[in-house]
Amino acid sequence: MDRELMNMHVGKTIRVDRGGPESRIGKLLAVFEDFFVLLTEKDGVVYYKTNHVRSITESSKDAMKLGLKIPEKLDFKTAENFHKLLESIRFQWVKINRDGGPESLEGVLSDSNKHYASLIVNEEVVRFSLKHIRNISYGLMVGKSSKDEDESSSNNSDNNNEDHNSQKNDGDENN
């Protein structure tokens, strides 16, 4: 994706890629030399390498909405390029390639250079070619808006009541 084109969309809600496991909707926060920063509802702040993005979509009717309350001064990592971004999040818990497929990894970023990144995953050190990293995120999340929290907490209490009732019924069967 062209940096100039991406800069025109900073501050707007966009969809990255048209579909598939890597497609995400989020607010474009910033654009750098070879990556951009997207705030998503599900994954928090995600750093996408621009050379892996096939398309971006902006709603002409502003139909794409985020259910997030975005802080005025959201703090996220910035860097000149992707390699320097990796250096700045060294020793952080990261997730690489968020699609959940076989090339999706989660662990502590222990090292990086211009060719690969090293992750500590369980008891292994995995070296991941930078060419194959599509996106990365690290522990930074933004809370949902209070309306969404109210709905999810009422759903959780309903589920807890159901669980409690089913446990009570299970106990009745034993008597």
Image (spheres, rainbow, N blue to C red):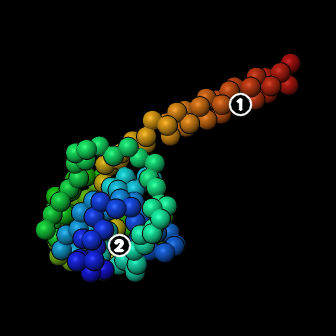
User: What amino acid is found at the position of numbered circle 1 in the picture?
Assistant: Glu
Residue 124 picture location, percent across and down: 34, 61
Comparing 121 with 22, the one in front is 22
Q: Residue at x 29, y 43 (%)?
A: 71
Q: Secondary structure at mark 2?
A: loop
Q: Which residue is mark 1?
A: 162
Residue at the location (19% across, 69% down)? 32
Query: What is the crowding at mark 2: few (fewer than 14 residues within 10 Å), some, or many (at least 20)?
Result: many
- In the image, what residue occupies the spot 35% across and 78% down? 52
Question: Of the residues shown, which amino acid type is indicated by label 2?
Answer: Arg
Q: Is residue 108 shown left or right of residue 59? A: left
**In the image, what residue occupies the spot 29% across and 60% down?**
11
Across and down, in percent, residue 31 comes to 23, 68
Whether residue 95 is visible here, answered yes or no, is no
Residue 94 place in picture, x, y as percent: 32, 56
113 and 82: which one is in front?
82
Q: Which residue is mark 2?
A: 134
In this view, which residue lies farthest toward the front?
61
- Counting from the top left corner in percent of width and height, residue 48 is at 32, 68
Q: Give whichever of 154, 72 is nearer the camera.
A: 72
Q: Quadrant of residue 136?
A: bottom left
- Lateral position of residue 4 relative to residue 173, left or right: left
Give the quarter of the image for residue 1. bottom left
| Any part of residue 6 in sight | yes
Q: In which quadrant will I find the C terminus?
A: top right
Numbered circles on residues, count: 2
Which label sits on residue 23?
Answer: none
Q: State left or right for residue 142 relative to residue 85.
A: right
